Image (tube, rainbow, N blue to C red):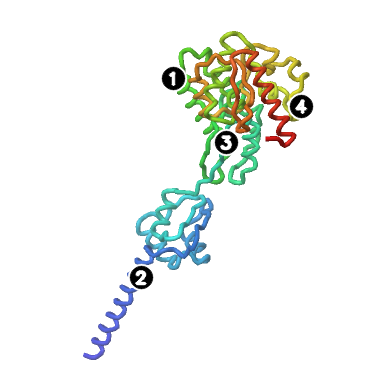
Amino acid sequence: MRRPRRLLAALALLAAAGATLAWSAWRSLDEPLAVAEPLVFKVAPGSTLARVAAQLAARGVVAQPRSWVLYARWRGLAAAIKAGEYEILPGSTPRRLLEQMVSGQVLLHSITVVDGWRTADLLAALRRNPDVASTPGVAPEALMDRLGEPGVSPEGQFLPETYRFPAGTSDLELLRQAHAALARVLAAEWAARDPKVPLASPGQLLIMASIVEKESGLARELPQIAGLYLHRLAIGMRLQADPTVIYGLGARYDGSLHTVDLQTDGPYNTYTRAGLPPTPIALPGAAALHATAHPSATDALYFVASDKDDGSHVFSATLAEHNAAVADYVAHLRRKSRGAP
């Protein structure tokens, strides 16, 4: 009788130990991972969950990797994890991390396209970003061919804003997103434009918006500058926009515009040619596009920097008023050079 009793007692102990182990393994799924600060962990393409668990255990992150893998297999999720970078936050649990990897909630990086950049600036920023994969042949002259719009100038074709993306996203894919965003905003602004705007197409709106973008650093002035240039365009006056001349000079621009630059004819010299230049000269932001589609009504034809040194301008309806404003600004600069208030 003693032997069966001992056997039963041993089996009971084993069952209790097994239950304890099972309970510990189950409880470990909801215990915080050993991360004191956000940890970026990369799941390589083709990795199994067992390998991921072993890597995390080796780094001291997962305390019971086998339990984690067995749970995932029981749920039928072990083969469903996705490759990519994951941010493991303090307080996260193995159960939450599995959900994160199965749903592909990868870490997103960002790049900000700045209002007024040229397309060349955007391409350079993409090349510098270590999280963006470079695509051979992504150069300005071939760019729109790659995006399915051959013959279109790439200048102005990408909307300035912040884009978020997983590591390894190609530059071409980000450019495609930025171009699609520009197309949506441009179409919406064109459809809702002030009917008195003297522009014949969305393309003309984009060109004018790029000039407006380069002429002011103050958002509040954008509608007024747009109104001024559209007023010039409506009455047949040359735009006389310095930024278009600078764009046409390209690498020859030395930081200052000279009289000879304004007098040398070229497709982007709006001092010598009437109407709009042939392409945009920069990437206009949403605010510049909206201001150009909904400009302020104004009789102003001229503007010059103000003496407030805040980027604002003085707008004038007549040349005499403008000349007086220019004289005031020159006097202001002379006082500043002398250190006078």
Report, in whole angstroms, how far the alpha carbon at label 3 lies from the one at label 4. 25 Å
Residue at which label 4 appears: 252
The number of numbered badges drawn on the structure is: 4
**Disc nearer the start of the sequence (1/3):** 3
Residue type beneath disc 4:
Arg
Q: Residue 68, located in which quarter of the rendered image? A: bottom left
**Disc nearer the start of the sequence (2/4):** 2
Residue at which label 1 appears: 192
Can residue 145 be spotted in the picture?
Answer: no
Residue type beneath disc 3:
Val
Residue 197 location in percent, x, y? 50, 14
Residue at which label 3 appears: 113
**Disc nearer the start of the sequence (3/2):** 2
Q: Nearer the viewer, residue 107 or 12?
A: 107
- Quarter holding the C terminus? top right
Report, in whole angstroms, how far the alpha carbon at label 3 lies from the one at label 2. 50 Å
Residue 83 location in percent, x, y? 50, 50
Can residue 45 be spotted in the picture?
Answer: yes
Residue lying furthest right: 260
**Disc nearer the start of the sequence (3/4):** 3
Q: Nearer the viewer, residue 81 or 338?
A: 338
Q: Residue at x 64, y 29 (%)?
A: 307
Residue at which label 2 appears: 24
Report, in whole angstroms, how far the alpha carbon at label 2 lies from the one at label 4. 72 Å
- Residue 198, compared with residue 308, is above or below; it is above
Q: Residue at x 25, y 83 (%)?
A: 8
**143 sits left or right of 259 in the view:** left
- Residue 233, compared with residue 335, is above or below; it is above
Q: Of helix, strand and loop, which one carries label 2?
A: helix
